[in-house]
Structure formats: C-alpha cells, structure tokens
Amino acid sequence: NKQVIFKGYIDGVPQLADFELKVGKVKLQAPKGSGDFLVKNLFLSCDPYMRGRMRDYHDSYIHPFVPGQPIEGFGVAEVVDSDDSNFQPGDIVSGFTRWEDYSLIKKDSIQLRKIEPDGLPLSFHVGLLGMPGLTAYAGFFEVCSPKKGDCVFVSAASGAVGQLVGQLAKLHGCYVVGSAGTKQKVDILKSKLGFDEAFNYKEESDLNATLKRYFPKGIDIYFDNVGGDMLDAALCNMRIHGRIAVCGVISQNNISYPKGITNLWNLIPKRVNMKGFLQSDYMHLFPRFYKEVSNYYKQGKIVYIEDLKEGLENAPAAFVGLFSGHNLGKQVVRVMH
Ligand code: NDP
C-alpha cells in the first residue's frame, strides 16, 4: 500500500519536500463487526483549498491535515470489502478518501456517496460533477444573480471552477472574458471553451487598464478565483449594481501578510454586492446541478478539460503545480494498481 504522507505544517508555497511517499502492507479486508469498509482509490483530486489544511489553524471550515498521516481529500474509489450493508464490493463511491492505494473507511467517518454509472468519466466526480462543478454552478447562479447580456469576468478561467463558470455564463447569454496565466490557456479559453475574449494576466502591466479595454462599459459580474491585484483592478471596473462572487484567493494563499485591497470603496457609489461563499452551503442544489450539468455535457453544450497525472507518487507534484499554474484544467491524479 503506497501512501502520500503529510510531513508537517508549512509557511509559504507548498513544496515536494512537504510530502513523503511511504510503502507498507494493508489487509484487504474490513474487520468483521466493525461496520467499516475498504476502498481501492481510483482518482484523487488536487484542490487549492488543501493548502489551507497545511497550516496549524483550527478556526476554519475544515480541520488541518495531521502530520505523519496520509493526505485527505476528494476522490473516487471502488469498494473492495465491506462490513457495512450500505456498501457492496464493486460499488463506486465519491467523496473524502486519502492519498493511498487502499483506504479503510471507518464507520463513524463516512463521507462517501455511491455513484450510479452514467457513462461519464469517473474522474468527473471530483471535477465537473463534483465539488468544483458545484462551486461554479452555485457561485454563478446563486451568488452572481446573472441576467442575459451581463458582462462577466472570470479569473483563473481555465481551471476546474473557472472553465465551467465561463461556459455556464455563455449558455446564459452573457458576454464573458477570462484571464489565465499562459498563452496556451488563453487560446483554449477562446477556441475550446467559448469565451468571447481572454487575456494572459502575466503579460499585462496595468490590470485596471486591461479590464477597461475588455469591458469599456464596465463589469456586471466578477467571479473571483484569485483575489489580490486582480480583485483590486476589478473593483475599479464594476458597473452600478454589479456582483462579485468571492470564490477564492489563490494569489494570496501562500503569503503570510497579504497586500491590502485599496479599491474597496468602489462598492459604495456603485452599490456593488460582493459576497464570499462556500460550495458546501449549497449541497441542496446538488441534484439539480448534477442533472443540468451532466445533461449539458452529454448534449455537447459544454466541454471539460482535465489534467490527468498518472500515479499516486506524482500527486504531490500535481498539487504543488496548482500554485504556479502548471495544471491545464482540473487537476486529477489516477492511482495505478
Ligand atoms: P484551478 O484549477 O483554477 O487551479 C489553480 C489555478 O490558479 C492555477 O492553474 C493558476 O492558473 C491560478 N493561480 C495560481 N497561482 C496564482 C496567482 N498567484 N495569481 C493568480 N492565479 C494563480 O483551481 P480551482 O478551479 O480548483 O480553484 C479556483 C479557486 O476557487 C481557488 O481560489 C480555490 O481556492 C477556489 N475554490 C473555492 C471554493 C468555495 O467553495 N468557495 C470551492 C473550490 C475552489 P493561471 O495559469 O491562470 O494562473
């Protein structure tokens, strides 16, 4: 049983050295009478929020990783043995598992749900049809209150969340511009994901002027995945009664003392509604989201780009790469057995 172990709490940018690969033995059985079940992990998700769990900070919506223990995260797995009558060998499940070949899921810690096969890639359950997908769906429809014809700006637009936000906005009849960190990503936003315009923020010296160029009449909706300078520039370009969904602050995640936002005052004269949100508050929308988004995909109305790394041992590099934009689309790791 290979495991990726969390070594200890960190400051700054996550490094490969923060993880350790351990090889050990595992009993391929759930103990009788325990109510536990054993899964073979198939796909593991790399998500930016996991950086927050590498700090010794307990006042958050999720507890920190435990040093010396395998990394915990979203995944897709197959049940191989079960002492729980709700789960049978061969069942495919999705939810919280661990970065290891096999995981024993304890009766009192089950956060996995059964997946009914529907012909779509299993990895989608940690991307398009999982947590990032719900984030895009709930964030856009519930937090941004979109209207046809709205001018929408999405940052980290080619990522797990951003690519779906942009496509949902297009389906809703909006004008959509995305930002991303490489030429390749910018090209894909326009050629494959249907964004009206896209730009490489790393090549822009004055983000305020850049946004004015793409939004001469201003932004109605800013779906913010990055925070920092981009948020500051977007604040100056919001239209009256605009909406900002504060989804993530990945530009600030690795900085101990983030730079202040100086343009917040724009919220007042423009009566902009800026709201932070957590996808987990919108679990009640999950059935609707799942049905709508999987149908859009099956009908060819949307696409979804995944960055699939092979092998559990490559999970740390895949995760670390999120913070320098190495991933092209949703970062997933396929566990090889
Ligand atoms: P992505 O797939 O978008 O991967 C992260 C991307 O962020 C990178 O590829 C990179 O793209 C960009 N990035 C990295 N560092 C920086 C930086 N310093 N400045 C600007 N961009 C940077 O991740 P997700 O789609 O999974 O997550 C997107 C955001 O949504 C994150 O902030 C995450 O924390 C947040 N989130 C929030 C949730 C909620 O419930 N509120 C739930 C899920 C995610 P590029 O090349 O374009 O720079």
Image: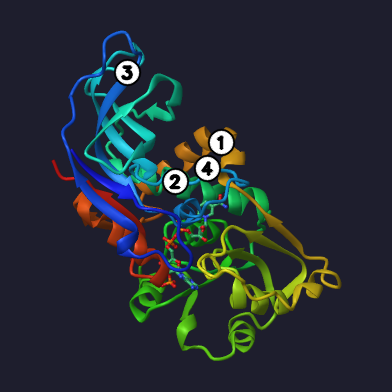
- Residue at point 36% right, 34% down? 94
Q: Quadrant of residue 187?
A: bottom left
Kind of residue at badge 3: Phe
Sequence-wise first label, 3 or 4: 4
- Can residue 306 be seen here? no
Cα gap from disc 4 to disc 2, whole angstroms: 7 Å
Which tag is nearer the camera, tag 3 or tag 1? 3
Label 2 and label 3: CA atoms lie apart by 27 Å
Instruction: Tell me the distance, in whole angstroms, between the alpha carbons under discs 3 and 4.
Output: 26 Å
Asked if 92 appears above or below 298 in the picture, the reply is above
Assign the C terminus to one quadrant of the image.
Answer: top left
Left or right: residue 58 versus residue 302 is: right
Indicate the amino acid at tag 2.
Phe
Q: Secondary structure at mark 1?
A: helix
Nearer to us in this view, 62 or 199: 62
Which residue occupies the extreme right position in the image? Answer: 269
Instruction: Give the labeled residue for mark 3.
Output: 87
**Residue behind mark 1:** 283
Badge 1 crowding class, 10 Å Cα cut-off, few under 14, some 14 to 19, many 20 or more, is: some
Would you name the residue on which mark 4 appears? 63
Task: Report the residue at 40% width, 53% height from top.
Answer: 8
Closer to the chain start, of discs 1 and 2, is 2
The answer for how far apart the CA atoms under marks 1 and 4 are is 19 Å
Labels 3 and 1: the sequence-earlier one = 3
Question: Decide: marks 1, 2 in contact (CB < 8 A)?
Answer: no
Residue 116: % across, % down: 33, 28
Q: Is residue 324 above or below residue 199?
A: above
What residue did someone put label 2 on?
65
- From the viewer's perspective, tell me whether residue 118 is left or right of residue 250: left
> Residue 162, image x and y in percent?
48, 61
Q: Nearer the viewer, mark 2 or mark 3?
A: 2
